[in-house]
Amino acid sequence: MQPRKRITTALGLLLGTCIGLAGCTMAPTYTRPEAPVPAAWPNGPSYQQPVGAPADQELADIPWQSFFTDAQLQGLIKLALEQNRNLRIAALNIERSQAQYQIKRADLAPKLDAISIVNNQAGDNQKYTVALGVSAYELDLFGRVQSLKDQALEQYLATEQAGRTVRISLVAEVAATALNLAADRERLRLAQETLKTQQSSFALIQKRFEFGAASELDLRQAQTQVESARVDVARSTTLVAQDENNLNLVVGGKVPAELLPRAIPESPTAIRDLPPGLPSSVLLRRPDILQAENQLKGFNANIGAARAAFFPRIVLISTVGTRSDELSGLFKSGSDVWTFAPQIIIPIFDAGARSAQLKVAEVDRDIAVAQYEQAIQTGFREVADALAQRGTIDEQLAAQEGLVKATGTRSLLAQARYNQGIDSYLNVLDAQRSLYSAQQGLIATRLTRLVNQVTLYKVLGGGWK
């Protein structure tokens, strides 16, 4: 057999022996904890209980492009997914965690190094050595390295789920921020229209006052309405500017003017309703809950590493190569060299350090169980709150629309009675204030309904299969 073939054969046997001696992990068998929440959502007069959803249409399977069908919202969300800095950080954290996992995974395989040595000896004699070496490779007989690799894998998966959480939160935040901007722009328009109306009323009453047909009290009351409307216009202008700044921050750059919403979407298809009939088990697909479970699995794997620390460790140091007094003699017959130096580390006395490390690993696992259960409970409460609001928001919206209509009629009647000299101007002011408040309430209620849909979609973990 040629020297090179002998070296290759010996090296293959060495690697096969190393890999074959790797043991199984000593980590406890993982069992997912029972979800500490009811199987169904709360029931009551304030909750909407949807029924009859197709089983294959879970929230995590609905792309955000299908849920947010408004063209402006789609453009804003797409822009944010390209530019948002928090999302970039999450993506980089995923890459970093993946690299760390690859490092731990590489520890399961021997590391080969090429070695070239020239030894100067007495009488100017030299020895030339060329070899491949396995340096400090631990035989994973009790699964210590495997457990560390499993822990790194779960950490990587947890980081990946954290990235999904960031994406879902970003989509919902962009939608909610854009809707708030649209609502504040409607409030600004309402304030501006009210200001014009109050200015016209003030000018009319001022003329009547000059001709003695109106009292100074009426004049000053009308003036207070004008100043109050001016305050609301200034306040709404500030809110719109702040909303635009916030939207720029969320998106990650200057939002083009054509993507800025002008008004709250009127069409019910602008933001689709959610599919009904969802059990509470859908929470287990939320990325933050999956992240908590991955972290729990990682701490469970750490117990295996801590248990394996009680058993002996075998570390191999070996080289296979060729040696000669002359460079030309390398790889000739009879120049083969092989060294094998196993090192056995047997734990004897460590003042209880290993026992303490095992206890820490077990307590970390128990903490992770509690955190996982808490994540489920938090998610259940978030969904239940959103469902409670959803169950009454349509009724509230209908009542608010009726209130606007009624107060509008009242304002017209009060103005007519004042013009005819039947009532005082105080009744007109009261009716106008009620109408303005009802109109503002209608804008807020419409906004609440749409934001509730966004929130429910987010808390159910939708949009990122």
Image: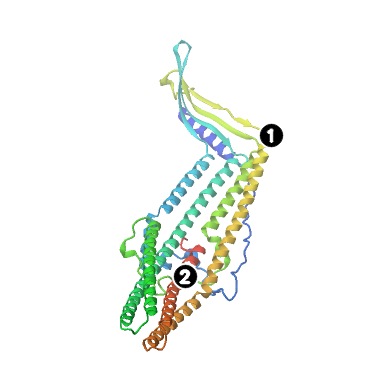
Q: Mark 2 highlights which residue?
A: 448
- Name which quarter of the figure residue 66 lies in: bottom left
Q: Quadrant of residue 259?
A: bottom left
Residue 318 x, y percent position in the rendering: 54, 29
- Visible in this render: residue 2? no
Report the amino acid beneath label 1. Ala
Q: Residues within 10 Å of mark 2 (few under 14, many from 20)?
A: many
Position of 258 relative to 310 (above/below): below
| Residue at point 50%, 30% (across, down) | 133
176 or 240, nearer to the observer: 240
Q: Is residue 161 visible?
A: yes
Decide if residue 140 is on the left or right side of residue 209.
Answer: right
State the residue lying farthest toward the top: 123
- The image's mark for residue 176 is none
Q: Residues within 10 Å of mark 1 (few under 14, many from 20)?
A: few
**Residue 4 on image: x %, y %:** 46, 29
- Quarter of the rendering containing residue 181: bottom left
* Mark 2 element type: helix
- For the point 50% across and 54% down, the residue is 161
Name the one closer to the observer, 311 or 175: 175
Return the residue nearer the eye: 423 or 278: 423
Q: CA distance from mark 1 to mark 2?
A: 62 Å
> Which badge, 1 or 2, is on the more N-terminal residue?
1
Residue nearer the viewer, 258 or 276: 258
x and y percent of residue 174 in the render? 41, 62
Residue at (62, 31) in percent of width and height:
344
Q: Which residue is mark 1?
A: 351
* Amino acid type, callout 2: Thr
Residue at figure coordinates x 51%, y 58% from the top left: 287
SS for dot 1: loop
